[in-house]
Image (cartoon, grey):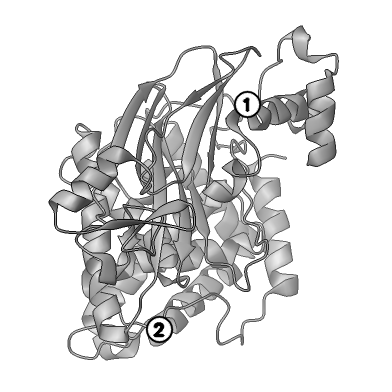
Amino acid sequence: MDSLEQSRVFLDCFKATANLEDPLPVWVPIYNLKYDEIEPAIIDWIRTYLEQFGCPQCILTPIIRKVVEEVLSYSKENPKSCGFTGQEYKSLQLNHEVISRVNHVCTELLDNEKLNNLLAQLAERNGAGEDQPDSATGTGIRTMQKIHYSKGMKHRRRTMEDRHVCLPEFDKLFCTRDTEPTNFYGVYDGHGGQEAASFAASHLHFYVAQSEHYPHDMAQAFRDAFLKTDKLFLEKCENHHLNSGSTAVACVHHISSKRIDLAWVGDSQAILVKRNPGEGIYKRLVHPVHVASDPNERERIHGEGGCVIPWNGQYRVSGQLAITRAIGNRYYKPYVTSNPSISLNQCTEDDLLLILASDGLWEGYNEFMTSMFVLYAIRKFPACGMFPPLPETLTTRSPLIDTICRFA
């Protein structure tokens, strides 16, 4: 389907299923937000809300930018209407204002003339000198090909504390200084509650984009973002008696220059899967992971006055926490730092895809098994059209691939 068809399918779904009277259509935090925290929260609420109805990427970004600009302007003109208390904004009241404006914009786009005008404006911008992707139509309107798939799954835990975020058109969504298209991906493994992972999933990428070092010094931009996210969340913890924490692995994909830049705290993992199977089928991008069993991490913690205690066969910070770096975990500061490790990578023609996941995946399947399973799935189900043809060596099943499929 082209952009017009995708947009009409979404708008029809929105009209048929959206409950405009729902007082809480998306998750809202219990804490208030400062002014410089509301833009990433607004973007996260809009994106989460519209993705419930299958909003296509071609109009998701312009809708988000339109609503963000309206709400930020309105919050300055009438701050009390947006929940301003004199120092902070009430999250629930601000959320009501945001969702009501999203509903208004989507209702307006049900008018074919206004939808056509929006798509015409996008086509004009795309034709004004921007690089055209392979999926661009003859009219210049992007039909965004889905280049990522994501899934969050709760296993034995009582509640889901992990979060992940996929942000195509990262450069347009946050009006960055990029000279090429960029995407952002992040995985956040929460513990002790969902608040840390939720805060990081909605704010960390914003502070990456806002760093004065982005995009020319990605290492420093990542450090700025991780440390600022942690600092702001710790303030919430103090005010609302929160004790949660979260690991994080964040990736910025520079599409034209074929660069993948990552930063991480904790034990989540990212691997690059190669096009050709073999012993070097994957490249581990997150190394080392930040766990208490790492001698270097133990030495760092001991040097700062902390302690790492072996407990039940595993090293733990203060006898409790298995990871040594995280966002949040206020009672373990400064030993459990949020200062990330960085990995800047230039992709080659042999690099096919990137997998980011929390330790929940890697504890059950190692990197080799996961890589082989994904490559086999692409060969088995080529209709998704995400990737170019794979080597013929993957056409015939191997006993290993059969085993992986049965386990999965």
Residue at screen point 52% across, 61% down: 162
Q: Quadrant of residue 55?
A: bottom right
Residue at screen point 71% across, 47% down: 5
Q: Amino acid at mark 2?
A: Ile
Above or below for 9 versus 379: below
Residue at screen point 34% across, 57% down: 309
x and y percentages locating residue 52 in the rendered image: 64, 64
Check residue 368 in the rendering and tell me which mark sits there, or answer none: 1
Which quarter shows the N terminus? Answer: top right
Which is more toward the observer, 177 or 296? 296
Above or below for 141 versus 194: above
Local packing at callout 1 (Cα closer than 10 Å; few below 14, some 14-19, many 20+) is some
Q: Quadrant of residue 383?
A: top right
Asked whether the residues under the numbered discs 1 and 2 touch, taking CB atoms below 8 Å apart as contact, a structural biologist would say no
Name the outermost residue toward the top: 392
Tell me which label, 1 or 2, sits earlier in the chain: 2
Q: Quadrant of residue 366?
A: top right
Q: Quickly name the residue at label 2.
A: 30
Which is more toward the observer, 30 or 383? 30
Local packing at callout 2 (Cα closer than 10 Å; few below 14, some 14-19, many 20+) is few
Q: Secondary structure at mark 2?
A: loop
Above or below for 367 versus 331: above
Residue at screen point 76% across, 25% down: 376
In the figure, is residue 349 to the left or right of 365? left
Which is more toward the observer, 119 or 231? 231
x and y percentages locating residue 152 in the rendered image: 62, 56
In the figure, is residue 110 to the left or right of 292? right
x and y percentages locating residue 228 in the rendered image: 21, 58
Q: Secondary structure at mark 1?
A: helix
Q: Number of callouts in the render?
A: 2
Q: Amino acid at mark 1?
A: Phe
